[in-house]
Amino acid sequence: MTLKAGNPDARAVWPLLLTALLCFTALPALALPEDREQPIYIESDRAERDGRQGITTYEGDVRLRQGSLRIEAERITVHTDENDEVQRVLAEGSPAHFEQQPEADGPPVSAEAYRIHYQIDQQMLELTTSALLEQGDASMRGNRIDYDIAKELVKAEGDAETDSPRIRMVLPPKNERPEQD
């Protein structure tokens, strides 16, 4: 199908495409400062925009990237405010994946869960169902992990109704550095 202005199918698609491209301002995050200044790129098989509600839903092997931020899921829902600024992102998959570089010289934070809720304005990352959070050699696994990015606070819960009712953590030993003369 050719998308020309006179084509009736184009009239339905162009507003969706233009809105999706224009409304996504930078996702403010804990990431590298330059991430916020980067455009957001989203690839998917399908998209639907509800302009009145400020909700765009992408489905089918969805990939979102902005600077060092990467989110991959079967479905991503982006919520914007009245100024079309992104407020939160909900990624759902089996599992969905999240990765972001918090510091230029540090390892990236990576996460996976069946549901990843990234509340940009509150700087919260909520991982639900088979959640995993990793940075470098450290990792945490549980049914739910809440990561308060601003406070650098992580809370985790197991699920008493499954075969894995407890959380699991790996804390690598600190490397001893030889003292320099």
Image (cartoon, rainbow, N blue to C red):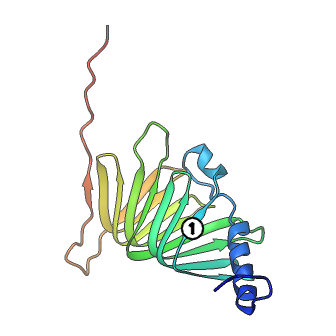
Q: Which element type, helix, strand or loop, lies under badge 1? A: strand
Q: Position of residue 7 (x, y in %)?
A: 75, 89
At a point 26% along the width and 31% down the height, the residue shown is 175
- In the image, taking residue 82 as reference, residue 27 lies left or right, namely left
* Extreme-left residue of the structure: 163
Q: Position of residue 142 (x, y in %)?
A: 31, 66
Q: Position of residue 25 (x, y in %)?
A: 69, 61
Q: How many discs appear?
A: 1
At a point 78% along the width and 67% down the height, the residue shown is 83
- In the image, taking residue 91 as reference, residue 162 lies left or right, namely left
Res. 80 image quadrant: bottom right
Q: What amino acid is at disc 1?
A: Ile
Q: Position of residue 131 (x, y in %)?
A: 35, 67
At a point 57% along the width and 67% down the height, the residue shown is 42
Q: Quadrant of the N terminus?
A: bottom right
Q: Quadrant of the C terminus?
A: top left
Residue placed most toward the observer, 168 or 43: 43
At a point 69% along the width and 68% down the height, the residue shown is 21
Disc 1 target residue: 42
Viewer can see residue 51: no
